[in-house]
Amino acid sequence: MSQKIASDSMHINIEQLQQELNVEQREFNELQQRHFKVRAKMALENEALRKSFRGASDFLMGKRKAVFPDESALSALRDRGEAIRQHSLANLPELLERLEKNLTANGIQVHWAETADEACTIIHDILTANNARTVVKGKSMVTEEIELNHFLEARGIECLESDMGEYLVQLAGETPSHIIMPAIHKNKAQIARLMHARAQTSDGSQVPYTEDVDELIGNARAILRDKFMRADAGISGVNMAVANSGTLCLVENEGNGRMTTTMPKLHIAVTGIEKVVEDFSHVPELLTLLTRSATGQKISTYFNMISGPKKAGELDGPEQVHLVLVDNGRSRIFSHPVLKPTLQCIRCGACMNHCPVYARVGGHAYGSTYPGPIGQVVTPQIAGLEKHGDMLSACSLNGACGEACPVRIPLPELIRELRAEAVSPQFTDAAAVTDATAVQEVMGRGAKRTLGESLIWRGWALTHRFAPLYRIMTTAMTRGRGLFRSKAAAVLLSPWTDSRSTPQPARRSLHELAKARGVADQYQNNTADKRGDNA
Amino acid sequence: MNSRERILQRLYASQASAQNPEQTSQTTGIQAEHAAGWTQLAQSEWLASFKQNLLDNHAEVIETTTANWAGELAQQLTARGVKRLLSGEHKQGRVLLNALAQFAEHQAAEQPSAAIDVQLVTTALSKEELFTAVDAGFSVASAGLAETGSLLVETGPQEPRALSLVPPLNIILLNASAITASFLTLVQAQKLPAHMPTNVLLISGPSKTADIQQTLAYGAHGPKELIVLLLTDA
Ligand code: SF4
């Protein structure tokens, strides 16, 4: 049937299309295995991709700006958002215990998972205990983080993403490229091909080829509604968990979150431990910051507050509700005095929308669940600097992300701190952490440390601390300035000079010029106190 | 020690050693200058803002009265060709049921086929039927929010969750006097139920998505249309 409809206008050969998509998927998987720099380079050379991200970033930045017309009101609201999130973190363990107590009183079963694997196992156990074979999923970044789909599918449980973007990404065999708009990297034509080649209606037939967005959404709607009707279980994320009332809050526009948490008889919510807030009085401002920063909406279509499974007398809703609290490195982040604000994040995506690097390389280049500035901060901390430390270089420290962040996370500072962590010596023994015994080192601390580089920096520090050495260095550089033009220098400096002009020291140092003009040398006078300062 | 204890132990240990004194467990400062953070609408603007926000979000707002709403809705439903509507077992549902029966009598002469089947649900809903054979769901909101054009729907035995979710047409009734400035003022005035019902919703339009190339499409998974009946005299 589909061929007939399609051939009317497009002459699409379905088998050929399917083969093309298989090749694209294989290429995608291969690329995701490669080094960050390779992915970034490939992305930069892909014009369609750059257009998609440029378009989406401009669109989302514009929408956000329009919905925050008043700078000072925005600033005040961000102060509130920051205060609320910091308050939640300052009281995190107490709030988690209170949340657990109130959720349990409401009939929601609470589980704790230290690692990704433990979280997956807990969820799998709940599903098997209830004979659940088919699962619909609401949008949840934590379940992407713990790679739940792979885990469940390997054990014979069908896991269908139901957020439109996530559904398309899953259909393509890819991963989300943005935390709010997962299929941001695909354009209409690509989605039309994808739906036509791979989506199947409930009666098993192919979806007709169309590039009309309403029709595309209509086709996906029909497929997914059928799944909502039949699924054994629904798995969702959580945007905020309210400790005082024992309530799980979900923010969404599509209705798939409500479907996931309402229609199947079993609902499992999964969240990072940082998502708790103390009281409902903290929710409205975080909600408004979230939707305005994410998509420029005053509010999302649905704000769904769940405080329990179906009660006696109620006609619908799940019979069981579970919450899985996932640590997966968060308690380690919590212990770090500088990196702790990482946990303030409300996952709005504004930092990536405003990041000039993200807009150019796109989400997949980062090779992690969370891309963009927040991804650069979160990923190395939960998955290790060895594997993900390279993405820290994808930042020009321009500061746009920090300015956009609705809860004022100092993202550039955190990126700098992590860069330092990556080249700092590891804590060798307990004595190295004398002042704050609970601080745990960042996973993979020192992974990027090399002997050569640390010697160079030590030498650099030394020459700047001792005036005679500094004089020798400046003299050598000014007198030997011709060497910078030599062939050897061109090779040695090429990583820098490939896209920048070659540095050229002056003929005379500033010190010499000043001396020639009769400025007195003050070095002798304050050398004593200067030394101490620079240590 | 299990995972729960290990996670909590780590968190408590870090908390105890946090050097910054303001970062310790205090509830001060956070409640204090509450409303200061975000500008609130004046009461005179509530109604206009409420309506405008809903219109901006692709909903339809019908201003009507306690005496007339059911009749007006009957006309709307007929005009849209609605065949089957579900409502919770509540007062307003019964009013609607009667109005539609009367309307059908009137119409029977001209259009014998136009009768709308209205059912007040009292037993568990068949999913199959709900997804495939119901055109409209009728719900009653307990509050409205001017700043965002949102409707507060508290589900329960008389207000099943699925009625505002599954049928393609979602109709929500609201007393204009129940409109308040914003979610923040609603929460501050402690108008959220002290013991939260199992599912409370803020609904601000029909379901939608912009996941395909930032192009807005309505009727993503839930209702394609939202009609708000605003009772100006109640
Ligand atoms: S870091 Fe800030 S801007 Fe980025 S997603 Fe989190 S809350 Fe939003």
Image: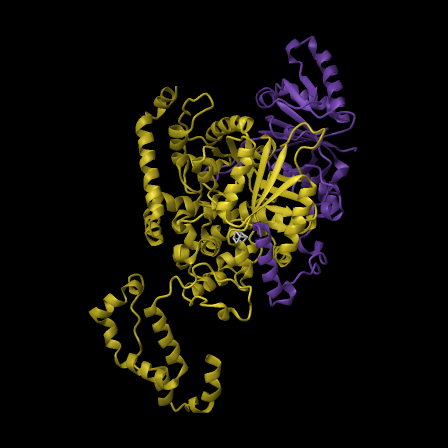
Chain colours: A yellow, B purple
Residue A291 locus on image (x, y percent): 58, 46
Q: Residue at x 34, y 73 (%)?
A: A455
Identify the residue shown where x is 48% and y is 43%.
Answer: A144
Q: Split into 4 quadrants, where in the image is the N terminus of chain A?
A: top left
Q: Specify the quadrant of the image occupied by residue A103.
A: top right
- Residue A332 against residue A424 in the figure, above or below: above
Residue that lies at the very extreme toward the front in this rendered image: B1
**Residue A169 shown left or right of residue A505 in the figure:** right
Q: Is residue B26 above or below residue A197?
A: below
Query: Is residue A127 visible to us here?
Result: yes
Q: Is A257 displayed left or right of A202 in the figure?
A: right
Q: Position of residue A463 (x, y in %)?
A: 37, 80
Q: Position of residue B114 (x, y in %)?
A: 65, 13
Q: Give the quarter of the image for residue A420.
A: bottom left
Residue sitting nearer the eye, B82 or B1: B1
B184 and B196: which one is in front?
Answer: B196
Q: Is residue A530 above or below residue A259?
A: below
Which residue of the protein is positioned furthest toward the left in this rendering? A487
* Whether residue A179 can be seen here: no
